[in-house]
Amino acid sequence: MSCPSGLHFNPVIETCDWPENVKCYPASLTTSTSASFPTTTPTTIQTAVPTAALTTIQTAAPTMTQTSASTVAPPATHTAAPTPTTKVPPTGRPCQRRVCYHTNWSQYRNGAGKFLPIDLDPFLCTHIVYSFANLRNSELVAFEWNDESTDWQVGNYELVTNLKQQNAELKVLLAVGGWNMASAPFTAMVATPQTRAHFISTSIDFLRGHNFDGLDLDWEYPADRGSPPEDRNRFTALVQELRAAFDAEGIQTNRQALLLTAAVAAGKEKIDKGYDIPAISAELDFINLMTYDLHGSWESVTGHNSPLYAGDLESDDKRQLNVDWAASYWVSNGCPPNKLVVGLPLYGRSFTLTTSSTAVNSPASPGLSGPFTREAGYASYYEVCDMLKQADAQPNFLQDQRVPYLVLGNQWMGYDSPNSLREKVRYTRSKGYGGVMVWAIDLDDFSGSFCNVGPYPLLNAIQDECHRRL
């Protein structure tokens, strides 16, 4: 593995590190294991970002001890998350991972918002996660008409995996699921050992056949949205069986084993209902924590999409809806810190103010749609930049939550800027977490034509901060 100038490979943490942290280790440690916005909405099938926390927080949590796949675990209580920190200390190793989700429906955005595989920068991310594949009859299937190559065209799968020819260190995974697919296909697939085995064997063929390096499970969510309580343990069984099969196939074919990852919820209710954290953490290569959509237009008051910390005036369950609480909760309940990848949004969530108040927690209804993303209450960062350029835009900063928002007329937009993302990166490094993840690469100003600071201002800030000496 090659490292940026000034860094050296550390075999213990399996990533680039500062020279003083890299020592000589026994050979046994060096072996890796596995702003006038239209209100119309798009007609394409997939639109919504995976949603991390849309429901009320529950108080009674299922146990974290695994039982048989067909047995409902008895109620128990998870360990409470540690008290949130108040500032990011200037410590931490370079980011172990920079995971970037790429959406296959961004090709349908109009004009300057249209995003194609040619727009991907193969050096900004350590992992690209192609989103999403569908799940039909317990098998992976392509979702879009041009995902797969044909005799007359090179498909988008191939165009994205071909980026590894430019960057040999890059890994490209395929994600299955997403918010729109919901739970029903997953519930059918995990129902029995036989249906899981069919999914696993056909998935290996599908992934290898399309030159993917791994699979990202994006079930939103086990034991939720129509998924029965039994699915919590069945999801654990699926992860364990996938890991065993991926490892065995790697040995049999003398290839690097396929990576196995999952995108997981940040809301306490969904965490408690859906995940045996110690069991799945033992098998997954890393875990992508969806620390965004923590507030949005489904609520009746303004709130930030992805606050780093709880607000000073927040109480009770609302103090759980922030990056720090969610990450701490996963770790305190059994996820190794170096496997936890913290989600960073490259988009904002908006509201329409219904009174003269413009502060956080002001009465509001859903925000308007952006001209390119065309989803009410939602805007890419490049659409936010267009709003910020308006003469009457009022940018603000939530000092307690460490994130910006803007007011433009009656529109209230909570978003992340290069500076707020830098602070989140410093936070993940200070905690020893396993890196950062972005949703989604196509929502940054990828062309550099909106924010006037060059292409990919958010991802470049993240990459720079990931390797900055603190």
Image: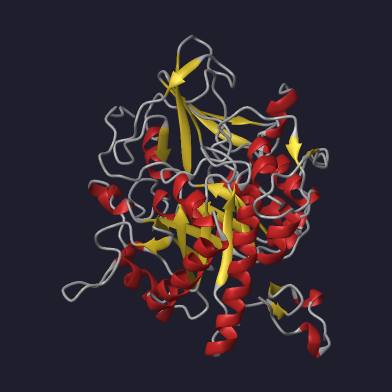
Residue 182: x percent and y percent?
Answer: 46, 43
Residue at image coords 60%, 31%: 397
- Position of the C terminus, as image quadrant, is bottom right
Extreme residue toward the left, this view: 152
**Residue 18's image quarter?**
bottom right
Residue 284: x percent and y percent?
Answer: 64, 64
Compare residues 70 and 305 and report the one nearer the observer: 70
> In this view of the protein, can residue 158 be seen by the observer?
yes
Residue at image coords 63%, 39%: 270
Compare residues 59 and 71 and report the one nearer the observer: 71
Side of 8 where 216 appears, left or right: left
Residue at image coords 75%, 44%: 329
Residue 13: x percent and y percent?
Answer: 74, 72
> In this view of the protein, can residue 125 be seen by the observer?
no
- Position of the N terminus, as image quadrant, is bottom right
Side of 392 where 404 appears, left or right: right
